[in-house]
Amino acid sequence: MLSRVAESIYWMSRQVERAENLARFLEVTHNLILDQPENVIDPWEPLVQVTADNEYFDEHYGDANAETVTQFLAFDRGYENSMLSSLRLARENARGVRESLSSESFEQLNEFYHFVRAAAERPTIESPNEFFDSVRRLAIHWTGVLDSTMPRDIAWHFANTGRLVERADKTSRVLDVKYFNLLPRVEDIGTAVDDLQWTALLLAISASEAYRRQHHLIEIHKVVEFFLFNAPFPRSILFCIEGADQSIGRIEELSDGDRDAAGTAKQLTESLMQRLHDTSVEEVLASGMHQFIDSIQVELNRIGEAMNQDYFHWVSHQ
Amino acid sequence: MSDPTQAQGQTQAPPTLLDHYQTEGFFDELIDSSGVPHPEARALVDLIQRLPSDELLRRQRSIERSLYQMGITFTVYSDTAGTEKIFPFDIVPRIVSSVLWQHIEAGLKQRIRALNHFLSDVYSEQAILKEGIVPRELIDTCKAFLPQCMGLKPFHNVWCHITGTDLIRDNSGAVYVLEDNLRCPSGVSYVLQNRHVMKRNFPQAFRASYVRPVNDYTTHLYEMLKEMAPPHVDDPTVVVLTPGVYNSAYYEHSFLAQQMGVELVEGRDLVVDEDQVYMLTTGGRQRVDVIYRRVDDTFLDPEVFRRDSMLGVKGLMRAYRAGNVALANAPGTGIADDKVIYAFVPEMIRYYLDEEQILANVPTYVCLRDDDRRYVLEHLDELVVKAAGESGGYGILIGPHSTKAERDEYANKIQEDPRNFVAQPTLQLSRVPTMADGCLEGRHVDLRPYILCGPDDVWVLPGGLTRVALRKGSLVVNSSQGGGSKDTWVVAEPGQKVADA
């Protein structure tokens, strides 16, 4: 596979995943404010922190509320990680490698982008819940179309790696920020609001039902464990890293050309996977979850850089 | 026109879209001057007559929507919102009878053989110049003549592998060649996509019209490209070379690569090492044997042509000369697109093939000739004047539609640089019924068939891109200037393969 094409597919996939996660966060937050007594917790400020782009937000919006945060995360054309920008970039990447995707995949992404773009052109969205629900469905549709129309060849494995690396990053961020914001309010622990907050957190990664089936009741360390280490759940960090590791392994096998495969990315995913297996939730909580998540994000960035060096821009390193 | 059932007084049919259709003295591709459909258009016209008058418009909108969803669009790049438009499509197809097609096909094959001889000759012996049949001065002053290509020896001596030739019909229905496009002719993807959406919308009329298939174009293209590989290569790797996603024909490049199942590469994906071309893949370098290039000649290799080219591949021409890679079309073919060289194609056919042209050129005044120039300057208000090296409908003066100031401007240009201009009589292009504000009205069309030239034979796709000038009365069909396209139905002869509906 051409290096340029591989890079575009990887990024296309990451960008759609990014858009999907933003839609999830926004949908859950819009739902949350319908459920909670007034002014108990401000859910909007933490959402800005999830992005780690607070500076841009402060500069362009100032006050964090439903309207400004939705505009920022969903529709801001100037912010390159907004939902709209991510989809625009994903589609541009897809356009550049259209011949390597199934027609259905491209058409679905095209539809997805046009749906969000059209919404961005309207002055307000009448029902945010309905809108974000549609976006989430389009995103799931995208995943389904990609997985059911693309052969499991190298193109799909690049797409899958991009998707899972991005997803692991977003799952870790939402846990980090929510945890930080939820935990200090000791007076709420064990109350209804607290339960609601943690359920919302699970909902953001579509994990509420899967969690309840396994644990029935909300317990903080179990929620954290679910986010980090639940191997069968498709949005947990462990699941994402295991999947990315397998796909990178296949990429190594499927790449033909005159270069000897010596992948740094593969080594990195293997060791991160090992670390996740070797760590317990008690250790994470005892030594500080923020530090732990921070170190995972550093590893994810290193995997991204290694993909770049191993497959996309290896020539310049010869 | 009248509905035959109504004429017999049996039923009182509701009004249909063709009730008031007028050919207005033009040659119409579907309907004759007394309002009767041509035999090959019978089934289609019957269908249109049976449809409620708003149904055609409804199907037109539905087709536009599906083209938009398929992403067959142009982007307006000045805008970060990514505004996009589809290439306008008109729902009423153009139908070509099998007899007319036989004539067109024979004429195109002859023309391509002659042009291929010419390209081979002009970049080697130059016999046709030595004998004074084509003036040497023309070649010396032709911007598209590339001296860097002298002595090139393409495999199987094929230069113009893929050609799109623009044809028109005049008021009598006679077919003329308007232009040759040998460099990088585009539009064939629209032929295939137009057919795709039309079959879905008019399955019955399509089946009843015995239309020849076009969807095997990419199979023919791939086979031809494979045959062009360096002879020592067993299992050649074919790629399509595109200038990239910002090129207006990018969709087509991508579509063709996808349909052939080959890589779509950009210049930056290729490297040349020891006169061998490689593409950069995730596993390292992989050899490339055949390049279907959709990058203009002069951008192909900064080592040989334009030094500022970011689209090309350094060393590509070295690899080509060494016989390690095939290029389709060969570099240098653009010379045949020069509108002055065009005027000499009838002579080429005589000289190389010892035949008379089957498809006529539009009578052309070559302003380089004193007599012709004098005539052109005196009759600017009647003629169409074209700049030799322009394309896409640019650099054209349509005399009868021009202002005095525009004519004066062209008169000056012609006198300053007579080599660069030709003129032709203003032909009344044939028309096809076309949707305009919910009604059917005649609009002028041309036709671009696509021709593949292999080692042993020339193949013509039975169909082509019918371009239509959507503005009333306009003769300019180019998409950059308000043109759209139509599906083109070539009717099968008995025994010929018919497309599945």
Image (tube, helix red, strand yellow):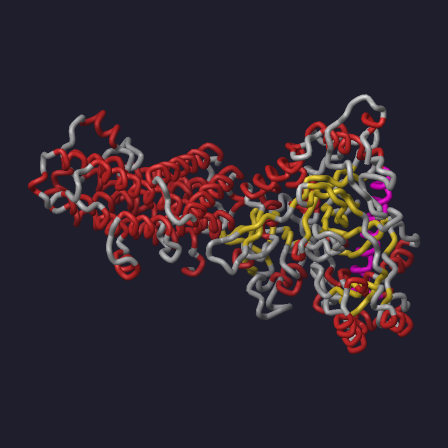
The picture places residue B498, in percent across and down from the top left corner, at 75, 31
* Front residue (pair B303, B184): B184
Q: For this view, does A70 lie left or right of residue B444?
A: left
Question: Can the viewer see residue B159?
Answer: no
In depth, the one of A210 and B70 nearer the eye is B70
Outermost residue toward the bottom?
B416
In screen coordinates, is B385 left or right of B218? right
- Quarter of the image holding residue B207? top right
Residue at 43% from the left image edge and 33% from the top image edge: A144
Query: Residue A264 magenta-drawn?
Result: no
Q: Is residue B126 left or right of residue A175?
A: right
Q: Main secondary structure of the magenta part?
A: helix
- The spot of residue B335 in percent (x, y) is 75, 63
Determine the image quadrant of residue B302. Answer: bottom right
Quarter of image, res A54: bottom left
> The magenta stretch spans which residues?
B99-126
Residue at coordinates 75% horizontally, 70% vertically from top-left?
B406
Relative to B371, does residue B50 appear above or below in the rendering? above
